[in-house]
Image (tube, rainbow, N blue to C red):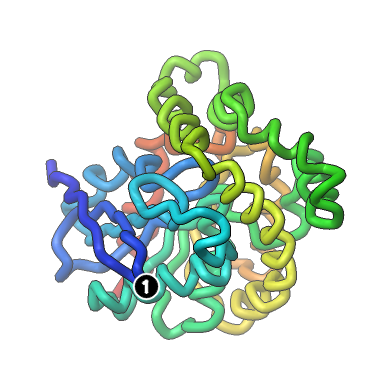
Amino acid sequence: MSQTRHLTVEIDGQTVFYREAGDPAKPTLVLLHGFPASSSMFRNLLPALADSYHLVAPDHIGFGQSSMPLVDEFEYTFEKLTEITLILLDHLGIERFALYIQDYGAPIGLRIASRHPERVNAIVTQSGNAYLEGFTPFWEVLFAHAKDRVANEAEVRKLLDANATRWQYEHGVPADRLNLISPDTWTLDQARLDRPGNKEVQLQLFWDYQFNLDGYPAFQKYFAEHQPPVLIAWGKHDEIFKADGARAYLRDLPDAELHLLDAGHFALETHGAEIAALIRDFLGRVLH
């Protein structure tokens, strides 16, 4: 089995950590993680696909092993995270690539795809939302916070505590698969959230998330006009981005391949082998 390499590069004065596996001469899959995780969420998927693909999974600034400047030292916006991701890909000489987007990875990856459609040859979305239909009651307090930060910050901060982090991994998971989720997942994520200054970073990104919705028309226009090959592998019990958000892709992408898994938000933890098999089959057919 191919081993994963753990690397860093300096971009705009920040250290960007990324995992890399496979031969760079093979087709590249760029994997973009969500909140509150890191590229660690792909730790099993990378070696599972590395015999056939070149895989690159960065940690966003403020997450994982990448730099975590304080909130007044860095522009914590999804626009800035997109910019840094593009600089990383250019630094690595990656011209064309497929994308794997999950949660926060979606507004980053879909900014890239919609602005540089010639560079993206396929998309895998796992709870990577691009339609208003995907939002659930989970978001009510976050959108209230977007309108009035002071009045809603105390409630939103509860999403950053240990119980909330564990819930992200365990909700919607069938009882017979709960024992597949390593406690290391939420323990590591929480340790990073608990770093001095990190909760303020997350609050800033929570607030900035509202502007991702402004990009949805451009993302959907990109889908409709360019018809990129898309694989949808989505936990049907996800209470953060519900299955209606997965089905909505088919409105603009009638040929997209939809697979609703018996899983929650972090479907790779319980359905990693199934998702790896879907990706291998999908990319094997659509990448020429």
Number of numbered discs visible in the structure rendering:
1
Within 10 angstroms of label 1, few (less than 14), some, or many (20 or more) residues? few
Q: Is residue 221 left or right of 57 when viewed as pictured?
A: right
Q: Is residue 165 visible?
A: yes
Q: Say which quarter of the image contains residue 226.
A: bottom right
Q: Is residue 10 left or right of 222 when viewed as pictured?
A: left
Image x and y of residue 254, in percent = 63, 67
Image x and y of residue 271, in percent = 44, 33
Residue 190 vertical position relative to residue 140 in the rendered view, above or below: above
- The quarter of the rendered structure image containing the C terminus is bottom left
Q: Is residue 259 visible?
A: no
SS at mark 1 in the image: loop
Residue name at image x 29 percent, y 59 percent: 56
Residue name at image x 13 percent, y 41 percent: 1
Residue picked out by circle 1: 12
Q: Amino acid at mark 1?
A: Asp
Residues 156 and 267: in front is: 156
Residue 171 vertical position relative to residue 123 in the rendered view, above or below: above
Residue 157 vertical position relative to residue 50 in the rendered view, above or below: above
Residues 142 and 272: in front is: 142
Residue name at image x 70 percent, y 43 percent: 242
Residues 78 and 197: in front is: 197
Image x and y of residue 39, in percent = 37, 47
Residue name at image x 53 percent, y 44 percent: 197
Image x and y of residue 4, in percent = 19, 47
